[in-house]
Image: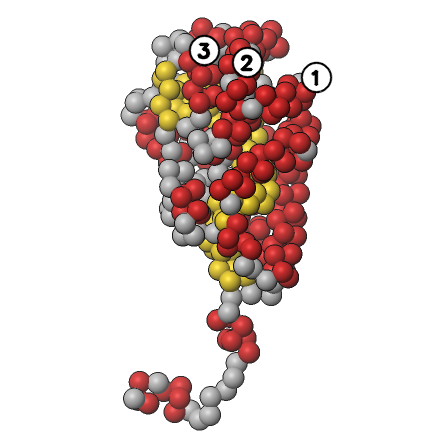
Amino acid sequence: FVGFRPDLEAGPIHYDEEQAGLSNRIVIKFSHVVAENTPKGLAAIYFAERVKEKTAGRVEIQVFPNGILYTEKNEFAALASGQVQMIAPALSNLSEQFPEFLATDLPFAFPNDEAVKAAFQGKIGQMLFQALERQNIKGMAFWPNGFKQMTSSKQELIKPDDFSGQVFRIMPSKVLAAQFQRLGAKVVPLPFNEVYPHLEEGKVDGEENTISNIYTKRLYQVQNYLTLSNHGYLGYAVLTNGRFWNQLPADEKQAIEEAMAETTQWLNNLTERMNEEQLAQIEASGQIKIHRLLPEERAAWIERLTPLYTEYAATIGPDLVQAVKELQQ
Ligand code: LMR
């Protein structure tokens, strides 16, 4: 028996405190669907480093990017059942379980970055996190990505009627579907991983996304037109399972919360610059025609899409829709 364990032959067993500590370590699997070189991808890594530092390695965050572990279709179920302990879905992806999240998909909901901050640090953020409690999910933070832009392979998107007859990929969200339908387009909900192949094969004509997603997944290489419309916002809710969270020791909870706050602040300073730099790269590639939506063009989109606020008030909740409208005043 001892022959199998040469370490035991070496003499009395030495009690290794570090080793013992490691065996008690808490592992948090953090699954997400985007590339590492994106706001969310970088934030997940930064967060893992902060947690490791603050807990002296007692808590290990293992990050799984690019949907390698779970995609949007099953990451929420994986969190709820304890297969992973953290996810950071785009807000739209939570709207099937929690219709309140449709509020953030209302067209032109956020006029600028200040409105985004006011929303998620204020009443709107609170209402969204409260909704999650219905399924014992704890909202840890809102992470930014940026404003969404429109792309198409078929036709430049300048007037509302330019969308007519095209097929757009969307995240599964009733409001996003309604947005394109009001523009005369059809929609296909698809996980993020499937966007590039669908565009490449011409199964869908266009999509909406942030510059960092368009750049890192090379969507601009399979699209002909990009309209800088800022018509919607892409943000994330970082979530953990309430049952998992509640059994963590208090000092580990505190360390994780501090790391999360530092990560969010770090990310807030990074995303705008990142989207700008990656837009410059896309522009320099010369592979896609870029149009910057003019104020009068934007006004026509807003006019076409505003009825969604009334149409979806009951589904979303009138208070939440009212709070979004107040961002625009
Ligand atoms: C998308 O599916 O387009 C985005 O939600 C991906 C992401 O998480 O940024």
Element at label 2: helix
Q: Which residue is mark 2?
A: 310
Asked if the beta carbon under badge 2 is closer than 8 A to the nearest atom of ligand 1, the reply is no
Amino acid under disc 1: Gln
Mark 1: give few (<14), some (14-19) or many (20+) Cα within 10 Å: few
**Above or below for 195 versus 176:** below
Marks 1/3: CA–CA distance:
24 Å
Mark 3 or mark 2, whichever is nearer to me: 2
Marks 2/1: CA–CA distance:
17 Å
Mark 2 or mark 1, whichever is nearer to me: 2
**Above or below for 249 versus 149:** below
- Residue at 44 percent across and 47 percent down: it is 79
- Name the spot of residue 300 as percent of width and height, x first: 55, 7
Residue 139 visible in the shown view? yes
Amino acid under disc 3: Arg
Q: Quadrant of residue 21?
A: bottom right
Element at label 3: helix
- Name the spot of residue 54 as percent of width and height, x first: 63, 60
Amino acid under disc 2: Thr
Mark 2: give few (<14), some (14-19) or many (20+) Cα within 10 Å: few
Sooner in the amino-acid sequence: mark 3 or mark 2: 3
**Residue nearer the viewer, 13 or 267:** 13
- Residue at 49 percent across and 28 percent down: it is 99
User: Is 69 left or right of 248, judged from the image as shown?
Assistant: left
Residue 36 visible in the shown view? no
Q: Which residue is mark 3?
A: 182
Q: Which residue is mark 1?
A: 329
- Residue at 55 percent across and 45 percent down: it is 138
Marks 3/2: CA–CA distance:
14 Å
